[in-house]
Amino acid sequence: MTKLKVWFLAFATAICLMAQSTGSLTGVVQDSQGSVIVGAEVTAENSATGLRLPTTANEAGIYLFPSLPVGEYRVSVAYAGFRTKVKSAIRLQIDQRLTANFELDVAGVQTQVQVESAQALLETTTSTLTQVVETRRINDLPLNGRNVLSLLGLQAGYSGPRNSDQAIS
């Protein structure tokens, strides 16, 4: 009976850890006139691992990658009769829901358009404020007593105590 409990606990922990390291990516595929493109082939490729995940735009032109591992992605959209469009450097953080819409142009000759994503993508599906504090930043900051709760002051929207007398313990 004890071995069963240990296996169950290990399995539950693994599931929880997997769930915490993903995000989602969605968007609409349209032509230059604003009409949705049903059946467009959308591929998300993780730049670090080379993992390629395909999906197809539905009848509303919406594509969805519901559970992508965090990282930087290159997303391409292709459909017969249209130019393939690529967006690079799409950075997905933990539990983030990004929207990346695509507008495809009619192709006269076989061409490919590559867009380098310079602006930050906005999360328009929720009003949640989130931020990932990277390991390097944590190691470089002078944290008093190495209390990780003092990192809350770095988060957007945090309005907790400002002086050391009221610090979180």
Image (spheres, helix red, strand yellow):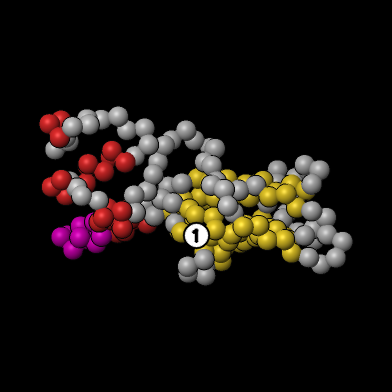
Q: Residue furthest bottom?
A: 50
* Left or right of residue 95, residue 44 in this image: right
The crowding category of the residue bearing disc 1, from other C-alpha atoms within 10 Å (few below 14, some 14 to 19, many at least 20), is some
- Image coordinates for residue 61, horizontal then vertical, percent: 70, 46
Front one among 109 and 14: 109
Foreground pick, 153 / 61: 153
Image location (x, y in percent) of residue 36: 75, 45
Q: Position of residue 25 (x, y in %)?
A: 55, 50
Residue 44 visible from this viewpoint: no
Q: Residue at x 34, y 49 (%)?
A: 133
Mostly what secondary structure, the magenta segment?
A: helix
Please determine whether, in this image, residue 110 is positioned above or below residue 8. Answer: below
Q: Which residues are magenta?
A: 1-10
- Please give the residue where the numbered disc 1 appears in the rendered image: 72
Tally of numbered discs: 1
**The N terminus lies in quadrant:** bottom left
For the point 62% across and 57% down, the residue is 116
Q: Position of residue 71 (x, y in %)?
A: 46, 59
In this rendering, is residue 120 above or below 153?
A: below
- Is residue 109 shown left or right of residue 43? right
Tag 1: amino acid: Glu
Q: Which residue is located at x 48 percent, y 53 percent?
A: 92
Q: Where, by quadrant of the figure, is residue 152 drawn?
A: top left
